[in-house]
Amino acid sequence: MKKIFLPLCFVAAIASLQSCKMKNTAAAVQGDADSKVYVAPGKYDEYYNFVSGGFNGQVSVYGLPSGRLLKLIPVFSMFPENGYGYSEETKAMLNTTNGQIPWDDQHHLELSQTNGEQDGRWLFANANNTPRVARIDLSTFKTVEILQMPNSAGNHSSPFITENTEYVVAGTRFSVPLGSEDVPISSFKQNFHSTASFISVDKNSGNMALAFQIVLPGMNLDLSHAGKGPSHDWFFFSSYNTEQAYTLLEVNASQKDKDYIIAVNWKKAEEYAKAGKGKKVPAEYAHNTFDEGKQLATSVIEHDVLLLDPKDCPDMVYMIPCPKSPHGCDLDPTGEYIVGSGKLAALIPVFSFSKMIKAIGDKQFEGDFQGIPIIKYEAALYGEVQKPGLGPLHTEFDGKGNAYTSMFLSSEVVKWSLKDLKVLDRAPTYYSVGHLMIPGGDTKKPWGKYLVAYNKITKDRFLPTGPELAQSAQLYDISGDKMQLLLDFPTIGEPHYAQALPASLIQGKQVKYYDINKNGNEFVTLGEKKANVVRKGNRVDVYMTAIRSHLVPDNIEGVSVGDDVYFHVTNLEQDWDIPHGFAIKNNPNAELLIMPGETVTLKFTPQKQGIYPFYCTDFCSALHQEMSGYLRVSPKGSNTPLKF
Ligand code: K7E
Ligand code: RUQ
Ligand code: CUA
């Protein structure tokens, strides 16, 4: 969430709030905060913290409690550090039905779960702009799959998962016509739809497939979370703009006093899909997978999708009124309480799953929304948290009966009790917190201990770096009754949601290098003696090896202007942390970074004759500077013989 537009009086109130906060930024840290975040040299952090990159399209990984940056994982953006999106092997990962899209907006992350607990297998990430969902393998920290969503735009309510990772769910923030119909924008009500996509995840391989889409009225699905325990079969979305406005949204989409939480019985939907209640319709979308054996990404275009219409599928979708333009939609660890965070509301409504089920049984409805029954507010309401603060956005849980809600406008984290809905504590954030995160805080088993606030506005928190600043995150100790601010740390891009898990869940299964004997890349070179250069027409394949401290072959002649030269570089090292790099002068496809045992390909189509030096870009040994060579490019048609 980047910006919230508000009535002017609101804005003025907030402006004064924020400016007074700015003056006492240093006052908040007390006690033994320093020792609680100090991770001595050579020691490890306790948690991995995966943080969405927002408009940088990547995922960053920090250690907690130190706040140290451990890695950037490229997902929806090309990445110069390791050649993601530049190498021939990875280009297809960014493929869509509109060609390669090299930069997206990444908002939410979810770690895979078994029985509602983190299992450390995969991390799912959404692309908000061009609707996509990615899967990252946590043994390699590599993006291994990206699935595009048809019939969707603004893939915001995504990628939230069901309790056993049966499905990853993706909901549409910007309603659009199904397919690519040419209709007037003013026909929003009749022609525009939001969709909830249910992507099945294979238990063993993790491979995703778009199982079905539920077609909903035109409105904005914002966020979501799956049920757990008693609510296992259900999935909950927040919605706004149920006014169905399509212009001047900041005013027109905030007129009603309530929008809705949308409750979807996905088990029922699954049964309807199996029973043939859906309609298969044409829809083109890309499905990209990275085969870790072949070390190659391929992209397949799918051609249809199964749509489920609530009109044909009774008892599948219900709506619960929720004040006012709800953003976060969060379920507590027991699966009984559903917290809607009305970003313009002065209270936080908490709904009860068991009351909701009873209300459905007793038909306690107050009409319908384009055919979807609306449950009476009071019939599903457990209670309201009164005066929690201004601008509630997101809620996480500590597993000890407490909820923590971020307050964008009053810049604070508010702790409250699920039992009696009383506010227990508040801690200021610097400034304007968006998401917050407790390790495991949206699962059945939160790990508690820490909370991180990901703030939207940084201002004076760090040394100034011109107009563009890093984003500010803040770490709190939540083990006691009162929250204690421990640490500020800068983050990359604009973090939205984040996840964290104990390091022990994934630390032991990290791949350290690839076994060269299992390298299934079509262009692998198994040993320097096999290094080779092969010409077919104007395509030249260079089978090159890299090992400390030379590239083989290191002199290549017989290439002409306009040839497509493919450097297939195999890193022969069989040891942890000995990558080699590869770069050649004047190549717009940039560079490579090759992990031990891996083969990666760089394409180069020289446009001018001359001598082109190439070299290893990663300082790999005392003779790293010597790890270089020359390519001779002759004029077109010169017939210089191949020599290497
Ligand atoms: Cu609140 Cu995109 Cu999750 Cu940002 S959204 S804050
Ligand atoms: S070289 S160690 Cu360019 Cu000095 Cu790097
Ligand atoms: Cu290999 Cu430097």
Image (tube, rainbow, N blue to C red):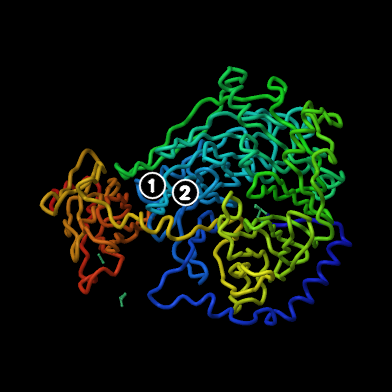
| Closer to us: 323 or 409 | 323
- Quadrant location of residue 191? top right
Where residue 83 appears, as percent x and y from the top left, is 38, 55
Look at the picture and state if 304 lies above or below 186: above
Look at the picture and state if 183 lies above or below 224: above
- Quarter of the image for the N terminus: give it: bottom right
Where residue 77 appears, as percent x and y from the top left, is 49, 52
Residue at the right extreme? 9
Q: Quadrant of ligand 2?
A: bottom left
Where residue 644 appears, as percent x and y from the top left, is 13, 54
| Closer to us: 529 or 538 | 529
Residue 529 is labelled as none
Left/right of residue 147 with respect to residue 158 in the rendered view: left
Q: Where does label 1 land, which residue?
A: 90
Q: Where does label 2 land, which residue?
A: 119
Where residue 295 appears, as percent x and y from the top left, is 32, 45
Residue 472 seen in this snapshot: no
| Residue type, label 2 | Asp
Left/right of residue 251 with respect to residue 637 in the rendered view: right
Left/right of residue 574 with respect to residue 388 in the rendered view: left
Q: Who's the residue at 60% across and 47% down the image?
A: 128
Left/right of residue 112 with respect to residue 450 in the rendered view: left
User: Which mark is nearer the camera, 1 or 2?
Assistant: 2
Q: CA distance from mark 1 to mark 2?
A: 27 Å
Circles 1, 2 touching at the beta carbon (< 8 Å): no
